[in-house]
Amino acid sequence: MAVPKRRTSKMKKRLRRSGQRWRAIKLNTCSECGSSVPSHIVCPSCGTYKGRQVVVIKDL
């Protein structure tokens, strides 16, 4: 079994774990209705994705 020759420094450990940090979702605006939508997701208010109607939204 492999055993590390030297102890991993605090700096190396923190640099390695920096990619695991929490990031807020980046929101885009819908081209049809102007509402905030996460990228690569159908707009929940109008049902469009990349300028075309994908989901039909029923009015309540």
Image (cartoon, rainbow, N blue to C red):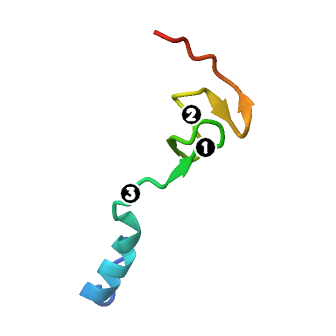
- Identify whether 34 is placed above or below 7: above
Residue appearing at x 36%, y 73% in the figure? 18
User: To which residue does mark 1 refer?
Assistant: 40
Quadrant where the N terminus sits is bottom left
Task: Tell me the tag on residue 27.
Answer: none
Amino acid bearing label 2: Cys
Label 1 SS: loop
Residue appearing at x 33%, y 89% in the figure? 5
Residue appearing at x 65%, y 37% in the figure? 32
Between 39 and 19, the one nearer to me in the picture: 39
User: To which residue does mark 3 refer?
Assistant: 24
Amino acid bearing label 3: Ala
> What x and y, as percent, mark residue 36?
49, 44
Q: Is residue 17 left or right of residue 26?
A: left
Residue appearing at x 56%, y 42% in the figure? 34
Q: Is residue 36 left or right of residue 15?
A: right
**Foreground tag (2 vs 3):** 2
Q: Callout 1: few (<14), some (14-19), or many (20+) C-alpha neighbours within 10 Å?
A: few
